[in-house]
Image: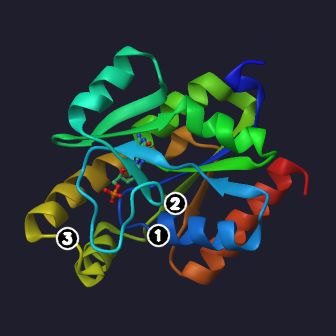
C-alpha cells in the first residue's frame, strides 16, 4: 500500500495564528485523530519533551534522514532549523487505524497536498491581522524580540498562500474557530 492511499489532515497557518490550540482541541475530542510528531532540529523549549511535541534530532541526523528519503516533506522553517514529517510517523498512525493531524508550515502543507491530493484535507488558520498576531506572539512569552520579528515577517508572506488550501478559517474567536474546523474535518471524514 502506498502512503498516499490513506487520509490525513493538515492544519497550517502563520506562527501564532492559533493552529496549535485548534489542533489540541481536535485531538482531545476525537481519539481517532492522532498528532503527527514531526522531527525538528531546534532545541526543546521549557516543558517540551522528546517524542511528545517533536522528535528532537541533531542537524546531522536530520540531513542523513533526508538523504535516506525518510521524510514525506521537510522544510527549513526558520533560518538554521529543519522541521519534517517522517513517513514512519504517518505509517505508525495509520497502523493504529487513526487519522494523522499535521501541524506544519505553509510550504510543507503544499508539498503534502501535492502528494496526497483528495486524501488530504488542508485547513488554513488565518489570524485576523498581523497586528493581532504580534500581540499574541508577545503574550505567549516564549519568543525573543528577534524571533517575534522573524515570525511576523514570515507571517505576512505566508498569509498570501491561503488560497492554496481546501478551507480557510479566520481565528477571531478561538472557540468559534475550533468548532468551524471540527465541522470541516467531520465532513471530510464522513463522521
Ligand atoms: P515551533 O518552532 O513554533 O514549534 O514551530 C515552527 C513552525 O514549524 C510552525 O509553523 C510549525 O507548524 C512548523 N512545523 C512543525 N513541524 C513541521 C513539519 O514537520 N514540517 C513543516 N514543514 N513544518 C513544521
Disc on the earlier residue, 2 or 3: 2
- Residue situated in front as seen by the camera: 169 or 187: 187
Q: CA distance from mark 2 to mark 3?
A: 20 Å
Q: Secondary structure at mark 2?
A: strand
Residue 183, above or below 66 = below
What residue is at 74 percent from the left and 73 percent from the top? 29
> Do the residues under discs 2 and 1 have CB atoms within 8 angstroms?
yes
Whole-percent x, y for residue 102 in the image: 56, 48
Whether residue 98 appears in this view of the structure is yes
How crowded pointer 1 is (Cα within 10 Å; few <14, some 14-19, many 20+) is rated as many
Whole-percent x, y for residue 73 in the image: 46, 29
The residue that label 3 is drawn on is 143
The residue that label 2 is drawn on is 125
Whether residue 160 appears in this view of the structure is no
What residue is at 30 percent from the left and 55 percent from the top? 155
| Disc marking residue 18 | 1
Disc on the earlier residue, 2 or 1: 1
Whole-percent x, y for residue 130 in the image: 30, 67
Amino acid at each position: 500500500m502506498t502512503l498516499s492511499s490513506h487520509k490525513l489532515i493538515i492544519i497550517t497557518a502563520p506562527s501564532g495564528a492559533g493552529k496549535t490550540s485548534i489542533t489540541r482541541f481536535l485531538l482531545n475530542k476525537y481519539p481517532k485523530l492522532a498528532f503527527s510528531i514531526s522531527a525538528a532540529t531546534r532545541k526543546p523549549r521549557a516543558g517540551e519533551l522528546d517524542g511528545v511535541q517533536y522528535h528532537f534530532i541533531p542537524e546531522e541526523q536530520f540531513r542523513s534522514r533526508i538523504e535516506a528519503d525518510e521524510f514525506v516533506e521537510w522544510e527549513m522553517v526558520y533560518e538554521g532549523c529543519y522541521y519534517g514529517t517522517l513517513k514512519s510517523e504517518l505509517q505508525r498512525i495509520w497502523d493504529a487505524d487513526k487519522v494523522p493531524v499535521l501541524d506544519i508550515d505553509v510550504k510543507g502543507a503544499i508539498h503534502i497536498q501535492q502528494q496526497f491530493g483528495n486524501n488530504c484535507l488542508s485547513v488554513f488558520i488565518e489570524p485576523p491581522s498581523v497586528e493581532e498576531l504580534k500581540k499574541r506572539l508577545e503574550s505567549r512569552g516564549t519568543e525573543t524580540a528577534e524571533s517575534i520579528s522573524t515570525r511576523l515577517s514570515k507571517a505576512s508572506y505566508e498569509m498570501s498562500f491561503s488560497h492554496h488550501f481546501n478551507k480557510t478559517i479566520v481565528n477571531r474567536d478561538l472557540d468559534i474557530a475550533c468548532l468551524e474546523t471540527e465541522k470541516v474535518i467531520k465532513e471530510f471524514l464522513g463522521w
